[in-house]
Image (spheres, helix red, strand yellow):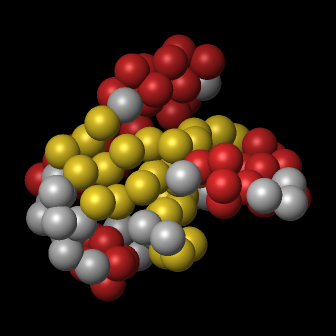
């Protein structure tokens, strides 16, 4: 998979240095993968949760942080649309039209 938005990862681990190692590991798994379905993602990252509309939520550092990404299976691309703490994720999910903000 081709991972887009690498600067987003860097900016996040600059804010949360403890996340860097986990984000680098996640990046490596993503870039070495050739996912064709959400089941493929679950097979390589068991804590991932499909959210529908090509959106997938990834737990980072034992659920301390979350990434929501659009996974474009035909083009083998992953685009990060949200990265934040679990609390920031909860705030996003509480918003009425969170899905529209990410697509």
Check the image and report above or below for 12 versus 76. Answer: above
Q: Is residue 7 visible?
A: yes
Residue displayed at 60% across by 24% down:
16
Check the image and report above or below for 53 versus 16. Answer: below
> How many labels, in total?
0
**In the rendering, at what x and y percent does residue 88 appear?**
77, 43
Check the image and report above or below for 44 versus 61. Answer: below
Residue displayed at 86% across by 60% down:
96
- Side (left or right) of 64 relative to 97: left
In this view, which residue lies farthest toward the bottom? 39
User: Residue 41's quadrant in the figure?
Assistant: bottom left
**In the rendering, at what x and y percent does residue 63 appear?**
61, 57
**In the rendering, at what x and y percent does residue 73 appear?**
23, 66
- Side (left or right) of 78 relative to 19: left
Residue displayed at 35% across by 68% down:
45
Residue displayed at 66% across by 55% down:
100
Q: Nearer the viewer, residue 22 or 83?
A: 83
**In the rendering, at what x and y percent does residue 60 appear?**
51, 51
- Side (left or right) of 69 relative to 43: right
User: Residue 79's quadrant in the figure?
Assistant: top left
Check the image and report above or below for 18 versus 25. Answer: above
Q: Is residue 65 visible?
A: no
């Amino acid at each position: 998979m081709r991972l887009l938005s690498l600067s987003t990862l860097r900016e996040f681990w600059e804010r949360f240095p403890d996340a860097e190692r986990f984000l680098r590991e996640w990046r490596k798994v993503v870039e070495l993968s050739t996912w064709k379905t959400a089941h493929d993602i679950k097979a390589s990252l068991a804590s991932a949760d499909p959210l529908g509309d090509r959106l997938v939520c990834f737990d980072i550092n034992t659920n301390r942080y979350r990434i929501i990404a659009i996974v474009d299976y035909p083009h083998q691309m992953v685009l990060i649309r949200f990265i934040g703490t679990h609390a920031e994720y909860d705030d996003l999910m509480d918003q009425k039209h969170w899905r529209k903000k990410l697509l």
